[in-house]
DNA sequence: TTAATACTAGAACACTCATTCTAATTGCAA
DNA sequence: TTGCAATTAGAATGAGTGTTCTAGTATTAA
């Protein structure tokens, strides 16, 4: 005989949403369990009923965002390098909160220690997927995979788009059109290897 | 009648040096007053004898580094834009620790609150000096100072160099030669406006 | 020698959290 | 209706850390 308990007021995802909201609005320093809970009018106990620790909650939230970004990025990259290079700015326009989280902060700003064990696999997988996407692009585009061509590809596909977008997120503004221009011009110069 | 007290074992600068060392080696999270003090075998009391609070100590350390970077950068910029664009990577090679502090972390990672009052003026001044240096470059180079030309100049002079260097500092390695190439090619594309 | 002073020394305090613990609810199966 | 389990509820706990406080020590002028 299976007996169901009371209905839940709060879902797992809602806690992660609330955490994201706190980080984006008030910074990682304000992200206490109490702030998170009171932000959704939930008691502290309910947080710990669903997540074994603060770090697990935040790590899962982080991974959820990385995954949602990376999936689209890799799809764009498989199709066209310039498209991938411009993907970041478009994604940020559609997901301003997730964008702020990913571009303005780092894992260490949120988690107190290392990745929780059962999530490390996921992070490794995500980072390998990104890496191999960029590697295969570099090889295809430059005809060879060396430290230099890999660095060049990473620069054009990742570093520059992030650098172009970040200042505007910092200001809390959506990236203006000039950002797309800067990314495109840089991509063409770096990938074509203009001198 | 003036009476001199005992000789000091520790100087103001040594505390800031020790703080920098801790941040660079173990991250901002490890930067406690106790860690700082024990790192230089000084007692906690001596820290507070010289600095009224943790925030003042760290803010002064930060400003010292910003000042040392910015002075050279503005000098280079007054002479030549490409030189300024390449200044960051060279400065980082000569000052790996200061580079890590400035490029890997932000004020909020170190200070618990806002800038201490008496230091806010200095920060405002520094940031205005940088701003006006970039503005006058943009105006000279593009013939007009608009939101777009300013953004373009900032991108080429600041955002891209930081983005190119950062991944290597992250790894704890000095930036390889390819970084200079990437910065130069980007600068030429962005400032000349190649399409 | 002595007194005044600048400094070292580190234990005690106060405060902020993450986490734990116990009790109170609530919905369903019987 | 009753009893069980899922969940809410939030007060109590404990660890970590910035700051304060009191005491001790070295240096120099007189």
Image (cartoon, coloured by chain):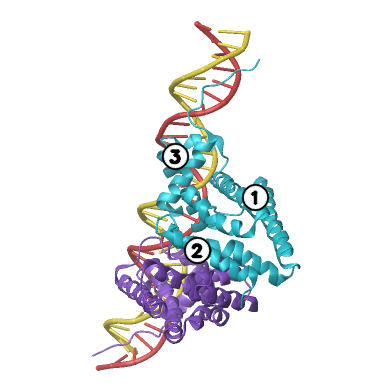
Chain colours: A purple, B cyan, C red, D yellow
Q: Is residue B45 above or below residue B173?
A: above
Of circles 3 and 2, the one toward us is: 2
Q: Of all residues shown, which one is farthest toward the front?
A: A195
Query: Is residue A189 positioned above or below B4 on the image?
Result: below
Q: Which residue: 34% across, 70% down?
A: A52
**Mark 1 and mark 2 on one chain:** yes
Give the residue pinned by disc 1. B75
Q: Residue at 55% x, 57% y: name it.
A: B86
Q: Is residue B20 above or below residue A81?
A: above
Residue B113 lies, in percent from the top left, at 58, 54
**Residue picked out by circle 3:** B37
| Quadrant into which the N terminus of chain A falls | bottom left
For the residue pair B138 and A2, the one nearer the viewer reads as B138
Q: How busy is the neighbourhood of tag 1: few (under 14 within 10 Å), some, or many (20 plus)?
A: some
Residue density around tag 2, few if under 14, some if 14–19, many if 20 or more, within 10 Å: some
Q: Residues within 10 Å of mark 3 (few under 14, many from 20)?
A: some
The residue wearing badge 2 is B181
Q: Do marks 1 and 3 share a subunit?
A: yes
Coordinates of residue A122 in the picture (x, y in percent): 33, 75
The subunit carrying tag 1 is B
Tell me whether marks 3 and 2 sit on the same chain: yes
Task: Report the Cα–Cα distance between label 1 and label 3.
Answer: 36 Å
User: What is the residue that sits farthest to the left in this orientation?
Assistant: A1
Q: Are marks 1 and 2 in contact (CB under 8 Å)?
A: no
Left or right of residue A41: residue B146: right
Q: In the figure, residue A73 lies in which quadrant?
A: bottom left
Q: Marks 3 and 2, Cα distance to the nearest angstrom?
A: 42 Å
């Amino acid at each position: 005989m299976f007996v169901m308990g009371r209905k839940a007021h709060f879902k797992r995802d809602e806690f992660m949403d609330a955490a994201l909201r706190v980080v984006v609005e008030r910074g990682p320093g304000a992200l206490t369990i109490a702030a998170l809970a009171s932000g959704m009018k939930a008691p502290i106990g309910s947080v710990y009923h669903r997540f074994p620790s603060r770090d697990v909650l935040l790590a899962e939230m982080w991974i959820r965002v990385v995954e949602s970004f990376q999936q689209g990025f890799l799809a764009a990259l498989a199709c066209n390098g310039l498209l991938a290079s411009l993907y970041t700015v478009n994604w940020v326009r559609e997901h301003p909160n997730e964008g702020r989280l990913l571009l303005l902060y780092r894992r260490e700003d949120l988690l107190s220690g290392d990745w929780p064990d059962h999530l490390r696999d996921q992070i490794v997988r995500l980072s390998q997927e990104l890496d191999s996407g960029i590697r295969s692009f570099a090889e295809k585009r430059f005809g060879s995979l060396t430290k230099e061509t890999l660095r060049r590809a990473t620069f054009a596909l990742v570093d520059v788009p992030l650098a172009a977008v970040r200042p505007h997120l910092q200001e809390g503004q959506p990236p203006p059109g000039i950002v797309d221009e800067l990314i495109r011009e840089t991509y063409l110069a770096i990938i074509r290897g203009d001198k």
